[in-house]
Image (tube, rainbow, N blue to C red):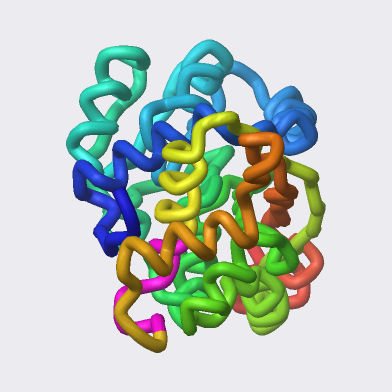
Amino acid sequence: MGFLHYSRDSEDFARDYQALLRCVKRPTTEQLYERVLDRYPKKSIVVDFGAGSGTLTKELVERYETVHAVETNAELREILIRDCPTANTIDATITSFDMEGEFDIGIMRHSLYFVPDHRWPGTVAAVASHLSEFGVLLVTLLHPEQPIFGVMEALGAPRIDAFQLISALRLFPEFRVEQVATYETIESESFQDVCAVARYTLNHRGREDYGRPVDDYTFERFVEQFLWDARRKEASWPYPSISLLIRRNDYWKSADPSRRA
């Protein structure tokens, strides 16, 4: 199968997402998450935005009593309900989820891509406004410098730029933002899986973002050129990420007379 555009709630998205899970190796990102999660007690309230098939949600329900798993894809939600029966599975997107009250841990791991870039800062700030006093919102995005974005640019679309979000969040002084880069890789001996990962990532941009229609032949040639080692019949390329740890800025709160007790 070549290149096609799809939405997050489609069966094609679910299929390619599962291929990504087979191929991605993210030990340093997992270490970062463990370091953050270890700081919070079992009674913490957790929201996993864009939970997918529950790869991370499984760990969350083992750690915490209250876990909300937000996922709009019906096929992935079925897996979530089966594998994480104690989680509160919610059919919603990041922007449509009606958040009530506060949470202690919020997670957006590679789930912002189906929100237009210009809405990222406002979306993240709106979610972060529900953080508890000592809560944290973890936002993980692909690092702009990596081979898969070379394919994206060759096909006419601008690469995803996580640094734009980091810069824009400076306009929200009520939050403190810590930035951590982690190293991930894509490894596979299946050309079909590599194409699936490429399709999944290229769909972080919409059809209108590409300079021209992309046919199957062109798509697969670019995958071969940028991502696939024909001689070894395998793929192994960097897939690094940037994680933002967003917390309330107590210094800003104490300086705001309207929020003093």
Query: Residue 248 sits in which quadrant?
Result: bottom right
Q: Pick the quarter of the image with the C terminus.
A: bottom right
Residue at image location 35% in from the left, 21% down from the top: 87
Q: Tell me residue 118's x, y (percent).
A: 47, 82
Residue at image location 58% in from the left, 46% down from the top: 132
In the depicted structure, whether residue 21 falls above or below residue 171: above
Residue 54 seen in render: yes
Q: Is 203 contained in the magenta span? A: yes
Q: Nearer the viewer, residue 131 or 86?
A: 86
Q: Tell me residue 80's x, y (percent).
A: 31, 24
Residue at image location 71% in from the left, 74% down from the top: 163
In the depicted structure, whether residue 249 falls above or below residue 14: below
Which contiguous range is marked in magenta? 202-210
Q: Is residue 158 left or right of residue 212?
A: right
Q: Is residue 212 left or right of residue 253?
A: left
Query: Residue 217 sits in which quadrant?
Result: bottom left
Q: Nearer the viewer, residue 246 or 183?
A: 183
Q: Is residue 183 left or right of residue 37?
A: right
In the depicted structure, whether residue 130 falls above or below residue 135: below
Q: How many marks?
A: 0
Residue 47 seen in render: no
Residue at image location 30% in from the left, 48% down from the top: 1
Residue at the extreme front of the image, as rendered: 231
Q: Tell me residue 97's x, y (percent).
A: 29, 53
Q: Is 58 contained in the magenta span? A: no
In the depicted structure, whether residue 23 falls above or below residue 1: above
Query: Residue 216 sits in which quadrant?
Result: bottom left
Q: Tell me residue 100's x, y (percent).
A: 34, 49
